[in-house]
Amino acid sequence: MTSISKPAKSLAEIKTGAMVTLENILVGRELTSRMTSLGLTPGASVEVLQNFGRGPIIVNVRGTHVALGRGEARKLLVSEGTQA
């Protein structure tokens, strides 16, 4: 049997307390620049500090707490687990 890797999920789908790895940013150049300035780059480890299912999502990335709108979080594709 071969193992099947899980497809990437949007950050908006991840539960509070989970650690994920940012895989891809599905936005234009302007928002990509904003995400990069916040430390949200492919390969970054992200801890979800707050996700109540509505309202902003608060994450910890590179030691900084960042609040993201739901629309932004939906465009950030992540995989569960972190890189060792």
Image: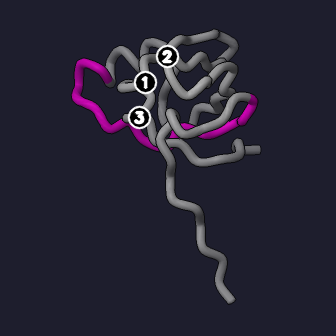
Residue 47's place in the image compared with 67, above or below, is: below
Q: How is the image coloured?
A: one colour
The kind of residue tagged 1 is Arg
Tags 1 and 2 touching, CB below 8 Å: yes
Which labelled disc corresponds to residue 74? 3
Q: Residues within 10 Å of mark 3 (few under 14, many from 20)?
A: some
The disc, 2 or 3, on the residue closer to the chain's N-terminal end is 2
> To which residue does mark 1 refer?
70
Residue range (magenta): 17-31
Quadrant for the N terminus in the image: bottom right
Q: Please report the residue visible at 62 percent of the width from the left and 20 percent of the height from the top.
A: 59
Percent position (x, y) of residue 7?
51, 59
Percent position (x, y) of residue 22?
53, 37
The kind of residue tagged 3 is Arg
- Marks 2 and 3, how far apart at CA: 13 Å
In what element is the residue under mark 1?
helix
Residue 28's place in the image compared with 57, above or below, is: below
Q: Residues within 10 Å of mark 2 (few under 14, many from 20)?
A: few
Residue 53 or 68: which is nearer the viewer?
Answer: 53
Which labelled disc corresponds to residue 55? 2
Q: Please report the residue visible at 66 percent of the width from the left and 26 percent of the height from the top.
A: 48
Tags 1 and 3 touching, CB below 8 Å: yes
Residue 13 or 53: which is nearer the viewer?
Answer: 53
